[in-house]
């Protein structure tokens, strides 16, 4: 849910409820993901190619609300090395769609193997990210060899970021 103007609490809750229904997102998985991210010591965000826009939006939203996060942008090829700093009290948000990017999967795997929480936003339960995910949020309506549903992924990412930045505005309890 992208906010262009301030919403009242009941308006946000109404939009969030419609979001769950329309996108067929499991509310428990969404709330669990928001809870893990909100309670993480550090948040690491990894994505490449088209999904990088989602990672940037998530990071920008958190930073705008004074919540630190680390965007693993792979500048200079250091994304995996940066992700190795994530420990068991940290959470990695990994975003990837077909064709899956190896650096994103490697970062998720590395953090998972160190006992950390990995929240994945991807297009299928068969995604290589699924194996390393504590919680998987599947973007609905994506068919192989087509452009992914950019709007749906944007809604998921923005809703997660807002649930972390403003926990009193969500239906997650």
Image (spheres, helix red, strand yellow):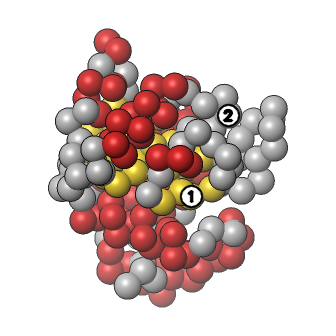
Q: Which comes sooner in the sequence, label 2 or label 1?
A: 2
Whole-percent x and y of residue 32?
42, 70
Whole-percent x and y of residue 139?
65, 54
| Dot 1: element | strand
Residue at 45%, 83% (x, y): give it: 171
Which residue is disc 2 drawn over?
98
Position of 117 relative to 159 (above/below): above
Q: Is residue 58 visible?
A: no
| Dot 2: element | loop
Whole-percent x and y of residue 140?
71, 56
Whole-percent x and y of residue 164?
33, 65
Position of 139 relative to 17 (above/below): above
Position of 76 relative to 112 (above/below): above
Which quarter of the picture shows residue 109? top left
Mark carried by residue 137: 1
Residue at 42%, 64% (x, y): give it: 33
């Amino acid at each position: 849910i992208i906010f262009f103007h301030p919403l009242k609490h009941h308006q946000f809750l109404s939009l969030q409820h419609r979001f769950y229904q329309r996108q067929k997102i499991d509310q428990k998985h969404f709330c669990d993901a928001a809870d893990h991210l909100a309670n993480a010591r550090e948040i690491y965000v990894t994505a490449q190619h088209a999904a990088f826009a989602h990672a940037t939006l998530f990071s920008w939203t958190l930073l705008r609300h004074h919540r630190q996060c680390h965007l693993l942008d792979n500048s200079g090829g250091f994304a995996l090395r940066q992700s190795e700093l994530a420990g068991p009290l940290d959470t990695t948000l990994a975003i990837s769609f077909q064709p899956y990017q190896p650096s994103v999967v490697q970062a998720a795997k590395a953090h998972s193997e160190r006992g950390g929480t990995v929240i994945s936003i991807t297009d299928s339960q068969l995604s290589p990210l699924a194996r390393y995910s504590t919680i998987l949020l599947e973007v609905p309506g994506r068919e192989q060899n087509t452009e992914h549903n950019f709007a749906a992924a944007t809604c998921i990412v923005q809703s997660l970021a807002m649930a972390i930045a403003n926990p009193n505005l969500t239906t997650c309890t």
